[in-house]
Amino acid sequence: MILVSELMLQQTQASRVVERLTPFLEEFPTPEGMAQGSVAPVISAWNGLGYNRRAVNLHRAARKIVDEHRGAVPDNLGDLLDLPGVGPYTARAVLVFAFERSEAVVDTNIGRVLARWEGRTLGRQEAQELADRLVSHDDPWGWNQALMELGALICTGVPQCVECPVSNSCRWFVSGRDGADPAPGSAAVSRRQSRFDGSDRQGRSALVRTLSAGPVSESDLPVAMGWPDDAERAHRVVKTLLTDGLVTRSEDGGFELPT
Ligand code: SF4
């Protein structure tokens, strides 16, 4: 469950993940259950969460877990990082929140706190090393959770420093918040997502949704992507879906979800 939820949370708002996680896990309760079927139902179940490539990676990860780890999610960093779609943050999050290992995660909230607390913009390795130095080895689960909440509730875009429990040791605060905010551009601190409406992502999502109900012919492609008057754009964008493994060509030359 932790691996699936962390993959969902990579690029989807927590409130949407909360709505979709339970039905998704009811459909795919185990790696075996997901691995023995095709990727198409996983893509269909994922649609609406955005960035559907994660569904393809999750299906590949499930097969690897079954083939190489007897169906159990691995509990070490190297094997987790070897799973498709699993990066340093997700691998450490699984270790901390599923196995309660003494690891430190750096997500967007923690990245913001660390940069301000250190008083400077941090590179990826610097942020991870700082988090590794600070993590409580007695309660890594609680420590990571507390730091995430500090970033989510107090050290936000406009930080509420007067309410902050670590203000006395925060370099940026102690300096009188002198100079630019060190958080933007620091490791893991998310940038504003581009608009969805009118984007290529919107067309990709529309096509995957339509394909969940059945194949689409070549001539119907622009309508299925929401661009009835822009066939050139539809054909350009569908190539990215083919490359990502989210869509395949059907026998009659149209498009369908991969089997
Ligand atoms: S004192 Fe302010 S800037 Fe520093 S960690 Fe706390 S909320 Fe963030």
Image (cartoon, grey):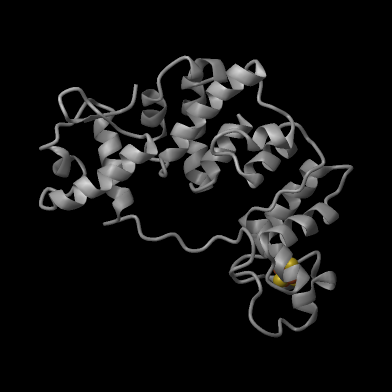
Left or right of residue 88: residue 28: left
Between 207 and 243, the residue placed more toward the observer is 243
Quadrant containing the N terminus in the rendered view = top right
Q: Residue at x 72, y 73 (%)?
A: 120
Q: Where is residue 237 in the image (x, y as percent from the top left)?
A: 27, 48
Residue at (88% x, 44% y) in the render: 137
Q: Is residue 237 left or right of residue 191?
A: left
The residue under the point 75% across, 84% down is 176
Is residue 168 shown left or right of residue 23? right
Where residue 147 appears, as percent x and y from the top left, is 73, 54
Q: In this view, does 161 lie above or below 31?
A: below
Q: Quadrant of ligand 1?
A: bottom right
* Whether residue 163 can be seen here: no
Quadrant placement of the C terminus = top left
The single residue placed furthest to the right in the displayed view is 138
187 on left or right of 21: right
Q: Residue, x 73% and y 29% (percent of image)?
A: 75
Does residue 102 appear in the picture of this structure? yes
Residue 146 position, x and y percent, is 75, 51
Q: In this view, does 183 lie above or below 80?
A: below
- Name the quadrant containing residue 258: top left
